[in-house]
Image (tube, grey):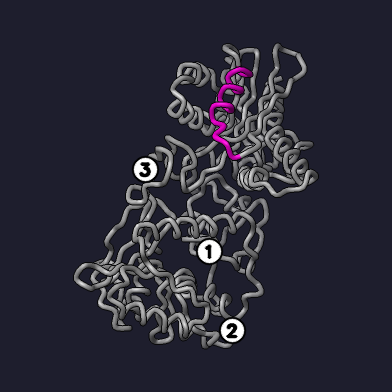
Amino acid sequence: MSNAIDKTRYLAGVQCLRRLYLLVHQPEFATKTDAAGETIIEQGHEIGMLARRLFRGGITVNEDDVDLAIRRTRELLADPNVSAIFEGTFRNGGVLVRVDILHRRGDGRWRMIEVKSTTEVKDHHLEDVAIQYRVLSRSGVDLASACVAHVNRGYVYSGGDIDVWRFFRIRNVTRIVQSLQPKLTFQLRAEWTVLGMPTAPDLPHGRHCTDPITCEFYDRCNPQRPDDHISCLPRLHANAIEELEQMGVESIHDVPDDFELTEIQRRAATCVQTGQPWFDREGLKKALGGLEHPLYFADFETVNPAIPKFGGMKPYDQLPFQWSVHVVRESGADPEHLEYVATDTRDTRREFTSSLCRVLGDRGSIVVYSTFESQRLAELARWLPEYAERIDAIQVRLFDLLPVVREHTYHPAYTGSFSIKSVLPALVPEMTYEDMEVSNGRDAGLAWQALVRGGLSQTQHESIMKALLDYCGRDTSGLLRICEALNRSNE
């Protein structure tokens, strides 16, 4: 039944009824899942499999055919020797659900558990559990409770097997999902009505296009906006955008002078309206005047696995695998480039740290962009206490260029963003990330994971390695060039 509602479709409808219609009737217009999306799906699967270890001896409903899966689930429910069921399948009133875990309690009643890879229970998780609760309770299952098992961000891995009872936290949400049942009834009626319509409902775009997830039909409902659109003002709140749109204002050129904006937003508006960049020369001179040679420009690349890989790590801790450093030994000297990439799945945190400390020496300013590198260094100091003193000395020398750019510059080409991906091509037009095989940190992490996973030809291995080195090197050479551009603005 093509119009049947499963929990994925139901949740799509909760987010946006237009999304539900397109998902069912026009799925060919959906954006294909990219490598990052596939990684998230794979990670969720790994978390789900890990959660099954909470209830050893449980039986999985493996049947792909829905009717066979439902029949098999009923058989397992009726067998008192079955302590837990994984992927139990139920259908009621045209709604189909597969339940992550059903645990039989000592009194014979059932506990339903939805497994999530997040570190907290979110509102849309409750909607997910609520639709399952409705179907199961109407299918004759004696439910004692409905729960969400989520990742415990505070769990510290000590090596060996994951301690699943500490890795997960199980929260009882029965009362909440029971209170959602009347709302759920109205929501289902709305979804059935929409699915029966001849065309997709014409609904306005808004925050729901990206909350709780970015809709796979986002581009269909949100055409690309021009660079002078009001959404290109830095950190302009959605309520302010809505207020301006209600006034008929969509271009930054038309924002009234008396409309309430922050100092940075007003500065950005003025730059767009005049077409001229703005530099606070005195502020830049003061901020950059304290930099001392040798000057180091540093950048790290990391991955953040949900399941910790090495001792001392917590879920979603950032694991550094690459660094790049450009160094200018003295004023006017040509920059030198040094770099490191881990090449296998070993614990290379010590190797990463020792090589970095060796390159950074004990004097000179270390320019970074944001607090990311400082946070990673603090974690390395915690994991490797023998390096704590050297890392502390390095952190004292860090100079964050991001707040300098944010407070003392603006260029119309920033289009509201102070990320290095926007700032570098604005201030140094010949340097962009558009020509790069790896062009952002997410892709760098995916590329590195493919590299160390193995199974690549020599050509593929060399190609990925080059892409990683080029990307991280572009970040640090870009930092150097941004500093040069800012210094020139003072001349």
Q: Quadrant of the C terminus?
A: top right
Between 65 and 215, the one lying in front of the other is: 65
- Could you tell me which secondary element the residue under label 2 belongs to? loop
Is 348 magenta? The answer is: yes
Q: Nearer the viewer, residue 192 or 233?
A: 192
Q: At label 1, which amino acid type do we have?
A: Cys
Q: Pointer 3: what residue?
A: 155
Residue 415 appears in view: no
The residue tagged with tag 1: helix, strand or loop?
helix
Label 3 vs label 2, nearer the camera: 3
Q: How many angstroms separate mark 3 from mark 1 (CA)?
A: 33 Å
Dominant SS of magenta comes to: helix
Residue in the picture at 48% in, 38% down:
310
Is 318 part of what is drawn in magenta?
no
Residue tagged 2: 199
Q: Earlier in the sequence, mark 3 or mark 1?
A: 3
The magenta stretch spans which residues? 345-360
Q: Residue at x 72, y 24 (%)?
A: 337
Image side of residue 291 versus residue 184, left or right: right
Marks 3 and 2, Cα distance to the nearest angstrom?
49 Å
> Of marks 3 and 2, which one's residue comes earlier in the chain?
3
Q: Is residue 102 left or right of residue 218?
A: left
In the picture of the structure, the residue carrying the numbered disc 1 is 209
Q: Is residue 187 left or right of residue 438?
A: left
Name which residue type carries label 2.
Answer: Thr
Q: Considering only vertical position in the picture, is 354 above or below 164?
A: above
